[in-house]
Amino acid sequence: LKLGSNQHSMCASVAGLQLPSAVPSLTDGSALDELFVWTCSEGEEAAVEPSIAAQAPQVSCNDADAHLQLSAAATALAVEPWAAQDARQFVGACSSAVHFGFYGCCVVRDVMSPAQCDALADYVDVRLAEACSFVEESGLDEATYVGDVFGKLRCRQRRWDIKLPMEGLVLEAMQSLGFSLGQLLSAAVGLDALLTELSCIVSDPGAPQQPLHSDSRSHDPGMLSALVALQEVTRAMGPTVLCPQTHCLAGSELLRSVRPHTDETAARVLGYQDRAIEEMSGTHVACQRGSAVVYDSRLIHCGGANLSSAEGGARRRMFVATFAMPGKVPRGSACTIRRDVIGRYRVRDFLVSSGEEQ
């Protein structure tokens, strides 16, 4: 799959399938709805065709850098959830890849089953308790420690990034992710993209909102993250804030011009960057259990503020996997991964062939 874009156009040709060549103005929500909401034919197989997926992706908004257009209507469309079945099937996968390339993000429902989410959530809670005990017993400062159990993360008050082993429930979760998102992953970063992050980000009531940021040092495409909600995520629980279509130079420049020029201590003040989020048409992505929030690592985003329990806040667990094309250098939490997992897994390792059952 190869995608290309200019200021208002995008085309994709997949094994003879010609997708619409024109992307309407972002202010025309109805036209975009007509373009991106397609119906998949029955019986289409979920397998990734190697001849298609092996091609290096060309997804970028570089030509739009000088004319970044943001609107509430486009933001709403960007995070309208896809069904996992549609993301798996051939036509649905093509349209979701076009959608992802244009907006830099998407949401896919039912990537994991409720039972799988519940089991993994319980497992994460145990791992978190063990990790906190390890850090305390070792005489380390939990607020600054980065090592075998915790990764680097912004605003660590009541927030943790737990490194996970590739075994048991975690391996099953990655297989589910590959089954549901394999087509999109292959189109966006390619079959040889390396797993650079395998963790669970947990926030408890009282966790502050993170500063807006991106996870990439480069404006070139080639890295994405998938965050799967292990429970329902409400607005009060501090869902991920995404700023659609900011995965380009213009997005970074806009962030520099609108975000508060303060350090992370300012994040403890509720609403400290509301204006910046509004200026960037950011949206708080509340979602169902088992839904995946997927974004290009260049996209401007942040973790939201988890309110007090009295205000509806609750523990929020997001299972995280990041894939990067060879040569891409992740930063911050995008490289939270155990030493025994580094460099061992690629997108192709989690794909399900047409003859296998999930």
Image: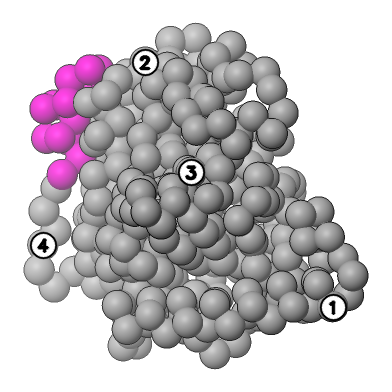
**Magenta highlight range:** 24-37
Q: Quadrant of the C terminus?
A: bottom left
The verdict on residue 85 being magenta is no
The residue where tag 1 is placed is 137
Q: Nearer the viewer, mark 4 or mark 3?
A: 3
Mark 4 or mark 2: name the one nearer the start of the chain.
4
Residue 159 sits above or below residue 116 on the image: above
In the figure, residue 45 lies in which quadrant? Answer: bottom left
Q: Nearer the viewer, mark 1 or mark 4?
A: 1
Q: Nearer the viewer, mark 2 or mark 3?
A: 3
Locate residue 114 relative to residue 276 in the image: left or right.
left
Cα separation, mark 1 vs mark 2, equals 51 Å
- Residue placed furthest toward the front: 310
Q: What crowding class fits label 4: few (fewer than 14 Cα within 10 Å), some (14-19), or many (20 or more)?
A: few
SS for callout 1: helix
In the figure, residue 84 lies in which quadrant? Answer: bottom left
Find out whether the residues at labels 1 and 2 contact each other: C-beta distance under 8 Å: no
The verdict on residue 30 being magenta is yes
SS for callout 2: loop
The residue where tag 4 is placed is 41
Mark 1 or mark 3: name the one nearer the start of the chain.
1
The residue where tag 2 is placed is 69
Cα separation, mark 4 vs mark 3, equals 41 Å
Cα separation, mark 4 vs mark 2, equals 33 Å
Cα separation, mark 1 vs mark 4, equals 57 Å
Q: As shown in the figure, which amino acid type bears the numbered disc 3? A: Ala
Q: What crowding class fits label 1: few (fewer than 14 Cα within 10 Å), some (14-19), or many (20 or more)?
A: few
SS for callout 4: loop
Q: As shown in the figure, which amino acid type bears the numbered disc 1? A: Glu
Q: What crowding class fits label 3: few (fewer than 14 Cα within 10 Å), some (14-19), or many (20 or more)?
A: many
Residue 185 sits above or below residue 284 on the image: below
Find out whether the residues at labels 1 and 3 contact each other: C-beta distance under 8 Å: no
